[in-house]
Amino acid sequence: MKKNEQMKYSNRKRREMEFRWPDIPMNVVLVEPSIPPNTGNISRLCAATGSKLHLVEPLGFDLTEKRLRRAGLDYWEKVDVRIYPDFPMFMERNADGRKYFFSTAGEKNFQSANYLPGDYLIFGNETVGLPDELLNTYAEQVLNIPIRLDNVRSLNLSNCASIVLYEALRQINIEF
């Protein structure tokens, strides 16, 4: 039996955990992502949580690329994906809603934010992060995930999105 078929034919029962999902979905924003599997993994995360995925161009890949589709498996049709030619257009089309920017340059811990349904969680490119212009313009909204910088330069983009999104959902769930 092939590895992927093991779960398909397993008798193990899957359980959906009791969880109060927010009425207004969360928003995950990727600014100029360049690694297809990261975006594919984040699309799957968005499908699993009912979050919207916003992609700000230029993208470092084609949305039909096989590696991107494979990472997102068959979940792409379950994701509300929106694409913007640049960050100013993203901001124009999403003027409402609170925006949080994530960077290793941030001085505030990501857990210090009081997340609400509909917030925008904004992440930068895998190799260079968010542009300095955005970090300077929105300095009060820049948050950081604690890591040991003596060991690693940064965390993987899809890991960061998962960490932050589930912390936001955890906080929101407590408020219900």
Image (tube, grey):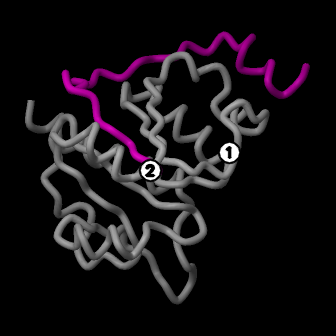
Q: Nearer the viewer, residue 34 or 5?
A: 34
Q: State the residue lying farthest toward the right.
A: 1
Q: Is residue 141 magenta?
A: no
Q: Does 33 sit left or right of 52 as displayed?
A: right
**155 versus 19 height, above or below:** below
Q: Which residues are magenta?
A: 1-30
Name which residue lies at 17% across and 58% down.
113
Residue 120, image x, y percentages:
28, 45
Magenta-drawn stretch, dominant element (helix, strand or loop)? loop
Q: Earlier in the sequence, mark 1 or mark 2?
A: 1
Q: Nearer the viewer, residue 6 or 149?
A: 149
Tell me, for residue 37, which label it has, or none. Answer: 1
Q: Nearer the viewer, residue 144 or 99?
A: 99
Q: Nearer the viewer, residue 151 or 104?
A: 104
To which residue does mark 2 refer? Answer: 86
Q: Does 68 sit left or right of 96 as displayed?
A: right
Q: Quadrant of the N terminus?
A: top right
Dot 2, how many residues are within 10 Å of its Cα: few (below 14), some (14-19), or many (20+)? some
Name which residue lies at 25% across and 45% down.
168
Name which residue lies at 71% across and 20% down.
7
Name which residue lies at 84% across and 28% down.
3
Q: Quadrant of residue 96?
A: top left
Q: Quadrant of the C terminus?
A: top left
Q: Is residue 22 magenta?
A: yes
